Each structure stands twice: as structure tokens, then as C-alpha cells.
Amino acid sequence: MNSRLMILALALALMLGACGGGESPATAEASMAKPDAEHAEGEHEEGNGPIRLSAEQISAAGLELADAGPAQIHQTLPLYGVIVPNAERTREVAARYAGAVRSVAKRVGDEVRQGETLATVEADESLQTYAVTAPLSGVVTARNTNPGEQTGDKPLFTVADLSTVWVELSLFPRDAGKVRIGQRVRFANPDTGESAEGKVIYIVPFGRAESQTLTARVLLDNPDRRWAPGLYVSAAVLLDESSVPLAIRGEALQTLDGRSVVFVQTEEGFVPRAVGLGRNDGEHAEVLSGLEPGARYVARNSFILKAELGKGEAEHED
């Protein structure tokens, strides 16, 4: 566990001791106490009794419970990529007639509706003023003109509809045969923790000399603009998936005495159970032994119970 998680675990362990709603301090302390050896015998080999928590303490610690059962285990290919505008939903906007720009209504980053005025231009030949309008609804991503300037051949604006974006994945030649059009791809933003899913729509048939990679393009829905062009993302291309009869969430697993364990909720409290594991895709881990179907376990923040167990062992040694 890194130092950040250790600090969080210690802080939440203190919360567990302090939590209890209307209970007296003595009652709250008792609710966290380990039962005597008679109750602890046979529960697990670590030598400590179950960890007793009230519903309020479970909520305060942010423990999420789930039932062990069937799941899909995925075989994936990890890749990295960058978000770019959907070129099929991007338009460059030029003046219809040469002339002087009289006004500019939009700046870079402004949202526009289809048909909305971006600028007005006075035509050189007719001296009539006409509006330059947005060809589609979206965001102004480039502005290349100011009032008083003369229009030319260059576009005055670029407008992009960012309700969908492309993610361009860097694909090494050795993996090129594994990726096909139509495959599902999961994305994660390492900074925000947000995730999404898209599909491969195109594989560029030529490589990039500077990086010696190919590009696989993925279409990603982006209705709330969470995925901004220019950001890097991690991706996992789904290569295969299979059903397993018994699995748990990957983040539920902890290591005690060199063994993989999961904290199971029993009538006496939470106890660590050693489990034999099969396939693991990070999201789910197949359970081969040590756990029964339907067992209720701590699926999230189980490291807090591991820290509490370690605290109990230290007190016992003292």
C-alpha cells in the first residue's frame, strides 16, 4: 500500500472508532472490538477474530458490498491514445465574396448553433454587407480574422461538433493483427478516473515513421463534452470474453501473509478468506476455491479492513 492509501486507511480507521451515531463511546469501542478466541476459532488462519462494524461505520468507511457470482472475464490489449475532433463533423468557414470584415461575433471556445452569425463582411464589388454563418452546431475551434481585415482564401473560422470525438490509438505492428474494425474499446482518463466505451471504426493502412506505429481510430460518443480533444487516454481493446461461474471484483483483493484474500461479511463480522484465483482482467477475478456463490464480500475500500486487522495484530503483540 502506498503512503497515500496508508494515510487514508489510518484516517478512516479512526473514523470507524469514532462513528456510531447515538452510541456512547464505550458502546462504539465495543462494536469495533474483536470477539474472544472461542468465537474467532476456525474463522481464518490469521489469528484474529471477525471485525465488527455497524451499518453506520460501514457507510462512514465507504465500504461497498457485493455478492460473489458469475461474471464476464475479458482478454484485452492495452494501448494509449489521444482524443482528436471528429473530422467528419468539422467545417472550415470562409467568406463567400471577397471584402472587408466589418464585425466578428464569435471567439475560440464559443458554442454556436447552425445558421448563427459568426461575422459580417462588406463585399468589395457590391458594397453589400452579408453574414458569415455557422454551417453546423458546435464549438469555434479556430478564428483567423478580426474587424477591419480583408478576407482572402484562408478560412475565417473552424467549427467542430464535439458531441462525438475520435480517439487515435497507437498500435505497434506486432499487435496490428489483433485489432479489427468493430471491436469494443474501453477508455479511462488517468487523472479523473472517468471511463467510456467506443468502437474501432478505421485502421490507417500506413504507419508513422517517427513512432513506428499504426493508428487505430475509435468513435466515442461525447454528449457532455467530458472528452476534450488533445487529452491522452489509456485504452483496452476487447479481444475476447468468456463467462466464469464465480468471480469477485478485482479491487476487492488484498494480500495477507503472501496470500490473496477477500473480506467476507459473516454474522459475527468481516473476516478475510484466502481464495484461489483463475483468470483476472483487472475488473473481475475468477474464484476457483475459498468462496461460495452468493457470499457477500467487500468489493471496494477493503484495504481499510486490512489496516484495521493489522492494527489489531499490533495491539495483540503489545
Image (cartoon, helix red, strand yellow):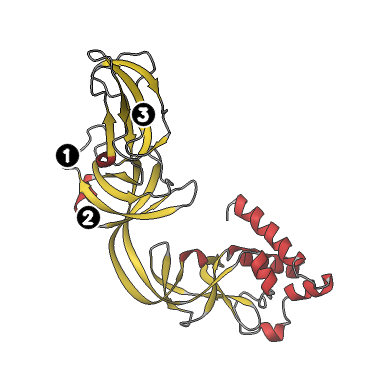
The spot of residue 108 in percent (x, y) is: 41, 29
> What's under tag 2, amino acid-wise?
Lys
Q: Residue at x 72, y 62 (%)?
A: 15
Q: Nearer the viewer, mark 1 or mark 2?
A: 1
Asked if 117 appears above or below 223 in the picture, the reply is above
Q: CA distance from mark 1 to mark 2?
A: 16 Å
Count the numbered circles shown. 3
Work out which residue is located at the far left of the displayed protein and give it: 205
Asked if 83 appears above or below 264 in the picture, the reply is above
Q: Which mark is residue 141?
A: none
> What's under tag 1, amino acid-wise?
Phe
Other-residue count near label 3 (Cα within 10 Å), few / some / many at <14 / 14–19 / ≥20: many
> What's under tag 3, amino acid-wise?
Leu
Q: Earlier in the sequence, mark 3 or mark 2?
A: 3
Q: Which mark is residue 178?
A: 2
Q: CA distance from mark 3 to mark 2?
A: 45 Å
Q: Earlier in the sequence, mark 1 or mark 2?
A: 2
The spot of residue 76 in percent (x, y) is: 32, 58
Asked if 134 appears above or below 196 in the picture, the reply is above
The residue singled out by tag 1 in the image is 206
In terms of depth relative to the viewer, which is nearer, 154 or 123? 123
Q: Residue at x 48, y 80 (%)?
A: 291
Residue 258: in sight, yes or no? no
